[in-house]
Image (spheres, grey):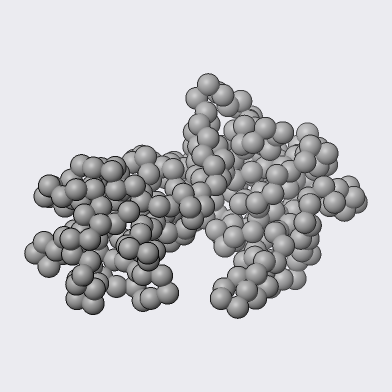
């Protein structure tokens, strides 16, 4: 079903983190769309004071005087959805699974902005997996939402090159910017029936789950190259970490050393650099942070914690 060009497309947006805001802003500013309101996650406690904090998309929606819905369970929003009858619901990093009963409510269904080149990297860990794996590129896939996670037909894709210093934070910014450029025209073409979604090849699919803090612990038996990518992939959140005695130590930045010879996890000072042995090669730690302390360079850390030399990280 298509919409006549003279009629505005009635849209509900569904998203939570700041990464979704540039794309949502681009749709809001486009005269072809009428943004009816925003679905977002509930306010959650955050920070040391555990103060209830709204998701960034909620603050954005309120600044634009848009309706905001924050259902604990999305199925409870079904009656509202049936009443407002949006033409389409656009999802970007919303954070809730969409029940089957809601999928057919919009005339044109739900369209998801997914941060990978599907069918590769279905799931939540799309910002981290390509960096860990040393991929040269990733991208965005605009797909129809179906019952199966991230398996719907592909409407359009855009490739995003990865730099040798990419972090999940810098990749999130790239995806946000590309989505903002891509979404208004592509979504409009889809609504007019000008784009024919293509089924995914399930045989080529891979899955990456949500990465949590416990998954971000460094395994020093891996190679220096693998660990360097791992550290970048975990930055800024959840943050790669290791243990020094009984203290958690966050490793923020590193580089592969030209030298080798230390045991995995063994810490040494070489040419005034903080160096750690790995399963293959050595790693120079250039930025790190003890829990509850300030971020320090490797040189600063050596100066303030000289006993780390010859210790082992684990």
Q: Is residue 43 left or right of residue 161?
A: right
Q: At which x and y percent is residue 245?
A: 33, 63
Tell me the quadrant of the picture where the N terminus can be found. Answer: top right
Residue 239: where, in percent of width, then height? Answer: 42, 59
Residue farthest toward the left in the current orientation of the protein: 271
Image x and y of residue 113, in percent = 59, 45
Q: Residue at x 42, y 74 (%)?
A: 292
- Disc count in the image? 0
Q: Residue 110 sits in which quadrant?
A: top right
Residue 59, quarter of the rendered image: bottom right
Q: Is 301 situated left or right of 97 in this image?
A: left
Residue under the point 38% across and 76% down = 293
Task: Give x and y (percent) for residue 169.
Answer: 44, 58
The answer, for residue 47, to whether it is visible in the render is: yes
Residue at the spot 61% in from the left edge and 51% down from the top edge: 93
Q: Report whether 54 appears left or right of 178.
A: right
What residue appears at the point 81 percent right and 42 percent down from the top-left corner?
A: 102
Residue closest to the far front = 246
Q: Nearer the viewer, residue 286 or 84?
A: 286
Q: Is residue 62 above or below residue 121?
A: below
Residue 146: name its quadrant: top right
Q: Is residue 269 above or below residue 193?
A: below
- Whether residue 36 can be seen here: no
Residue 190 or 102: which is nearer the viewer? 102
Q: Quadrant of the C terminus?
A: bottom left
197 or 279: which is nearer to us? 279
């Amino acid at each position: 079903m298509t919409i006549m060009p003279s009629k505005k497309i009635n849209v509900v947006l569904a998203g939570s983190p700041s990464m979704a805001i540039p794309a949502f802003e681009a749709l809001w500013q486009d005269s072809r769309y009428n943004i009816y309101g925003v679905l977002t996650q509930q306010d959650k406690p955050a920070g040391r004071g555990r103060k209830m904090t709204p998701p960034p998309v909620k603050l954005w929606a309120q600044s634009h005087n848009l309706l905001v819905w924050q259902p604990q369970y999305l199925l409870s929003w079904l009656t509202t959805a049936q009443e407002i009858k949006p033409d389409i619901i656009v999802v970007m990093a919303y954070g809730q699974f969409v029940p089957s009963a809601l999928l057919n409510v919009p005339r044109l269904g739900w369209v998801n902005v997914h941060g990978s080149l599907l069918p590769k990297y279905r799931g939540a860990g799309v910002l981290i997996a390509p960096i860990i794996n040393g991929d040269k590129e990733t991208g965005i896939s605009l797909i129809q939402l179906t019952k199966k996670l991230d398996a719907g037909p592909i409407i359009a894709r855009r490739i995003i090159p990865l730099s040798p210093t990419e972090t999940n934070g810098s990749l999130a910014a790239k995806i946000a910017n590309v989505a903002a450029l891509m979404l208004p025209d592509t979504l409009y073409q889809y609504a007019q029936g000008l784009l024919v979604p293509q089924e995914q090849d399930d045989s080529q699919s891979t899955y990456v789950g949500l990465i949590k803090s416990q998954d971000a612990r460094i395994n020093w038996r891996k190679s220096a190259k693998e660990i360097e990518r791992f550290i970048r992939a975990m930055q800024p959140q959840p943050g790669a970490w290791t243990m020094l005695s009984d203290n958690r130590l966050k490793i923020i930045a590193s580089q592969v050393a030209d030298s080798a010879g230390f045991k995995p996890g063994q810490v040494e000072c070489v040419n005034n650099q903080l160096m750690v042995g790995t399963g293959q090669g050595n790693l120079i730690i250039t930025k790190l942070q003890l829990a509850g302390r300030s971020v320090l360079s490797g040189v600063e850390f050596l100066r303030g914690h000289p006993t780390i030399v010859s210790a082992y990280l684990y």
